[in-house]
Amino acid sequence: YYPDPGQRNLRRVLSGYLNVEPERIVAGNGSDELIDLLLRIYVGVGDNVIIPTPTFGMYTFSTGICGGETISVERDDTFEIDLEAMKSAITSNSKIIFLASPNNPTGNIVPEAQARALLDTGLLVVMDEAYFEFCGETAIPLLSEYPNLVVLRTFSKWAGLAGLRIGFGAMQPDLARTLMGIKPPYNVNQAAEVALTASLEDISCLLERVANIIAERDRMAQVLHGIPGVKPWPSQANFILCELPEG
Ligand SMILES: *Cc1c(COP(=O)(O)O)cnc(C)c1O
């Protein structure tokens, strides 16, 4: 038996989990695959993508594969997004803005006002919420307001399924239909689908582990603060970025 190319069961289960219509949901071989598929739709030679740097490496990698260029806009000295610099970086060939929230590797989130300001540019904004479960802040409610918003999630981090490769995106139905039309038919394997379903059936156990990780993250940050010369950055994810003394 092959997996269902229409992802009917997966989209139904995810729809119940997110409270988003199944027609707005597409599952991928990890959320990395959805990044790649979105870029294939939107970006070709001569186009560009805007990212606030430092951020997750796959945006630049997959943009390059499509022949596109990445415009990296430096974050400020507390790693917040520089909104004005982001907006003035936009050119007539800009196609997508990628925002990771919480951001990898800095651990901070994109405040809603900043997300809205960038959505108001009209470019496709991809909010990558790979660490959502460790912070609880999401752009999902903005989907009904902004047809140019895509929210990506993954079961790799909070549910521990990185090796099985299962992520998903929520977006406007037209774009979801286009993605369904260009994805490899069997992109999500049967084992990943079973693991996702089992994870959601056992969600209270998984969320208890997430709560433990959050508590340990905060304890760890305190301990790191106590070490001379070590500067841990505040994190809403499951990791802590640290500045260390030279040597
Ligand atoms: C880990 C990570 C991903 C990739 O997740 P997969 O679903 O395993 O492909 C995407 N975005 C960010 C910011 C990540 O840290």
Image: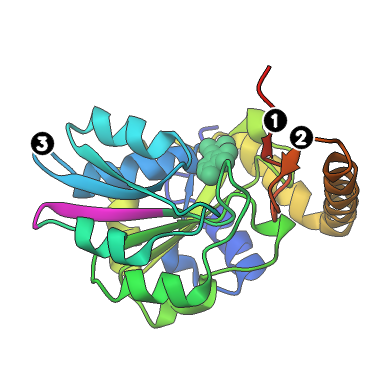
Secondary structure under the numbered disc 2 in the rendered image: loop
**Residue range of the region highlighted in magenta in the rendering:** 92-98
- Residue position marked by numbered label 1 in the rendering: 244
Amino acid type for the residue under numbered disc 3? Val
Amino acid type for the residue under numbered disc 1? Leu
Q: Are marks 2 and 3 in contact (CB under 8 Å)?
A: no
Establish if 86 lies above or below 199.
below
Residue 95 among magenta residues: yes
Q: Main secondary structure of the magenta part?
A: strand
Tell me the crowding category of disc 1: few under 14, some 14 to 19, or many 20 or more residues within 10 angstroms, Cα based: few
76 on left or right of 95: right
- Residue position marked by numbered label 3 in the rendering: 45
The residues bearing labels 2 and 3 have C-alpha atoms spaced at a distance of: 45 Å
- Residue position marked by numbered label 2 in the rendering: 229
Tell me the crowding category of disc 2: few under 14, some 14 to 19, or many 20 or more residues within 10 angstroms, Cα based: few
Count of picture labels: 3
Q: Sequence order check: which comes first, mark 2 or mark 3?
A: 3
Q: Sequence order check: which comes first, mark 3 or mark 1?
A: 3
Establish if 52 lies above or below 151.
above
Q: Is mark 3 within 8 Å of ligand 1?
A: no
Quadrant of the frame with the N terminus = top right
Q: Are marks 2 and 1 in contact (CB under 8 Å)?
A: yes
